[in-house]
Image: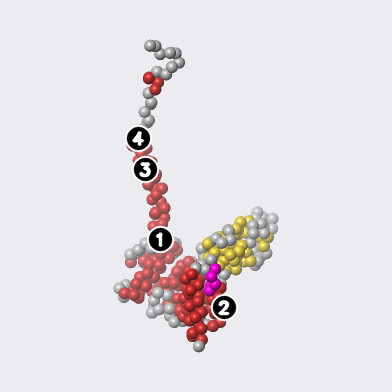
Amino acid sequence: MTVEEGSVGAQDLAIEPRRRMSTTQRLLLFSTAWLICLMPFLFWWSTWFGRPLSDRQLNEYLEDSKHPRHIQHALVQLGERMAKQNKTRQDAAAKQWYPELVRLAADPIEEVRNTDAWVMGQDSSGAGFHEALLKMLTDPSPMVRGNAALSLVRFGDSTGRAQILALLQPAHIAAPTAGRIVDTDKIGTAIHQGGLIAKLAVDQSGQPKQSVDIRSPIPGRIRSVAPTAANVAAGAEVAVVDPATEQVWEALRALYLIGQPDDIPALLPYERELPGIPVHVRQQALETEKAIRAREK
C-alpha cells in the first residue's frame, strides 16, 4: 500500500521537542521572582516601628535628623521600654534617653513631635517631661497639642482639657487661596493625617496654573468635600473630616478622669447608636458622661 500524495507521513507527525531553559535563564527567572517577593518585605521591615532596636541603634536613630522615620522608630521602641519599665521595673536603663525626649519636643518635624508627646506620657516621673508637654499645648499642630494634653492627664494635670475636647471635633479645612477644585477624594474615605483630600488649581496673573494640595490635619474619615470644578474663595471651607475612632476613644478616656459638666455636649454625638460609631466608643462616651455627673454631685 502506497502513501497517497498529500497525505501525512509518520515522520511529519513527530513533535519537535521543546527547547529547555538554560541554567542561566532559570537562575535569572528565579532571582527576579525572589526579588519581587523580597522588596516589599525589605520595605516593610525598614519602616515597621515594631522592629526591636539595640541600645546602639537607639542612639543612632534618635540623632538621625535626615531620616525622621528613624527618630519615630526609636521613640516608639523607647515608649515600649518605658511602659514595660512602669509595669515590671526591668528596664530602668530607658531613663538614659529622657534628655533626648525633652530635646525632641521642639523638633521641626511634626510627626516626630507628635510621637514624642505620646512617649513622654509613659512615665510621669520623667525629669523635664511635664514642662515640655505644657509647652507643646501651643504647638501649631492640633495632633501634637492633643497628644500632649492626653499625656498630661497621666501627670494628674488637666491643663490640656480644651485640647482634648478639640480631639472630639471634626476638622473644617479651608482653601489656603482662591482657586478651582480639580480633583477630590470620595466622601466616606478613611484618611490619615496629612492625607490628600483635594487639589486646587490656582491662576497666578497670566502664569500657568499651579496645583495646591489640600491635606487633612487629622486622621479620620471625610464627611464632606467641595465638588470638582467648584470655584472657591480663599478661606472658604473645602472639606470636613471626622476624627478617627482611636483619637475619639483616647479623648473620651481622658475626659472620664478630668471632664467637667460643660464638656457633656461634646460627648452626646458619640452616645448615639449610629453605624459610624463603634459600640466600644459609644459605651465609653456613656461612661464618661456618668463619671462627670458623679463628680458634679
Magenta highlight on residue 69: no
Checking the image for residue 22, the label placed there is 4
Which amino acid, by three-letter code, is at mark 1? Trp
The residue depicted at 41 percent of the width and 55 percent of the height is 43
Q: Judge by depth and name the residue closer to the eye, 173 or 62.
A: 173
Give the quadrant of the N terminus: top left
Inspect this view and state whether residue 116 appears: yes
Distance in Å between CA atoms under marks 4 and 2: 74 Å
Instruction: Identify the mark nearer the N-term, 4 or 2.
Output: 4
Q: Please give the label number shown on residue 48.
A: 1
Other-residue count near label 2 (Cα within 10 Å), few / some / many at <14 / 14–19 / ≥20: few
Residue positioned 39% across, 76% down in the render: 123
Farthest-out residue, bottom: 297
- Quick check: marks 4 and 2 in contact, CB under 8 Å? no
Most distant residue in the right direction:
206
Q: Position of residue 36 (x, y in %)?
A: 41, 48
- Judged from the image, the secondary structure of the residue bearing numbered disc 1 is loop
The residue where tag 2 is placed is: 265
Q: Is residue 264 left or right of residue 118?
A: right
Residue 32, position in %: x, y?
Answer: 39, 44
The residue lying at 48 percent from left, 78 percent from top is: 287
SS of the residue under disc 2: helix
The residue sitting at the top extreme is 1
Image quadrant where residue 120 sits: bottom left
Residue 99 to residue 295: above or below: above
Q: CA distance from mark 2 to mark 1?
A: 39 Å
Residue denoted by label 3? 30
- Distance, label 1 to label 4, CA atoms, is 39 Å
Where does the magenta region start and end? 270-274
